[in-house]
Image (spheres, rainbow, N blue to C red):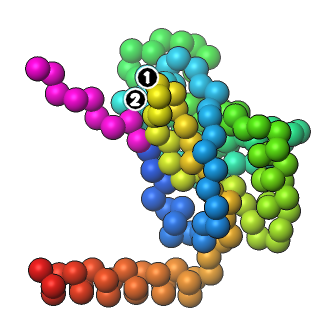
């Protein structure tokens, strides 16, 4: 019997360190065939990725999906802008939320659901350095408590 396929999930681990996530929205992604295969092989990363609302569409910018070695396409662009699929009312809601000072759209996670890839998009506010230090301190204390209780 074959081993189960690895979970095709990419997580933006820096997002929760850099931002206070207020809400999340599940969106679809417009992908090319080679990108789907690469995501199933976990060949992508969120370094420098962000989302913007451009001309009434939500775009994912700066995310890199590395092509598999078998891809021989001449026009492969690993960092191309990708359209996110949302209803008009959801886009209007995101516009309203991001117009508040300091709010931005941050990609949190890409995962496969029902044979299609989805993106968890967070509406977030950037953290200050003291906030980041406090979060690290709390996580360290919780880790130490967990070790003591074992």
Residue 8 x/y as whole percent:
38, 36
The residue beneath circle 1 is: 37
Residue 136 x/y as whole percent:
42, 81
Instruction: Give the residue drawn at x 62%, y 81%.
Output: 128
| Residue 104 found in image quarter | bottom right
Visible residue check, residue 66: no
Q: Looking at the figure, which quarter contains the N terminus? A: top left
Instruction: Give the residue drawn at x 69%, y 48%.
Output: 51
Q: Does the magenta stretch include residue 8?
A: yes
Q: Is residue 52 magenta?
A: no
The residue beneath circle 2 is: 40
In the rendered view, would you say 72 is above or below 18?
above
Instruction: Give the residue drawn at x 57%, y 48%.
Output: 120
Q: Is residue 123 left or right of residue 145?
A: right
**Contact check, label 1 and label 2, Cβ < 8 Å:** yes
The count of marks equals: 2
Residue 96 x/y as whole percent:
85, 58
In the rendered view, would you say 31 is above or below 110?
above
Q: What stretch is highlighted in magenta?
A: 1-9
Q: Looking at the figure, which quarter contains the C terminus? A: bottom left
């Amino acid at each position: 019997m074959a081993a189960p396929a690895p979970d095709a999930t990419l997580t933006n681990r820096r997002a929760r360190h850099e931002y206070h996530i207020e809400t999340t929205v599940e969106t679809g992604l417009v992908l090319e065939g080679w990108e789907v295969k690469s995501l199933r092989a976990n060949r992508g990363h969120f370094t420098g990725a962000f989302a913007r609302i451009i001309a009434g569409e939500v775009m994912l910018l700066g995310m890199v999906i590395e092509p598999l070695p078998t891809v021989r396409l001449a026009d492969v662009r690993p960092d191309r802008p990708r359209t996110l699929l949302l209803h008009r009312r959801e886009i209007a809601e995101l516009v309203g939320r991001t117009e508040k000072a300091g709010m931005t759209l941050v990609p949190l996670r890409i995962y496969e659901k029902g044979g299609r890839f989805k993106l968890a998009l967070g509406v977030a506010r950037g953290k200050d350095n003291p906030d980041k230090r406090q979060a690290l301190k709390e996580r360290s204390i919780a880790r130490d408590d967990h070790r003591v209780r074992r």
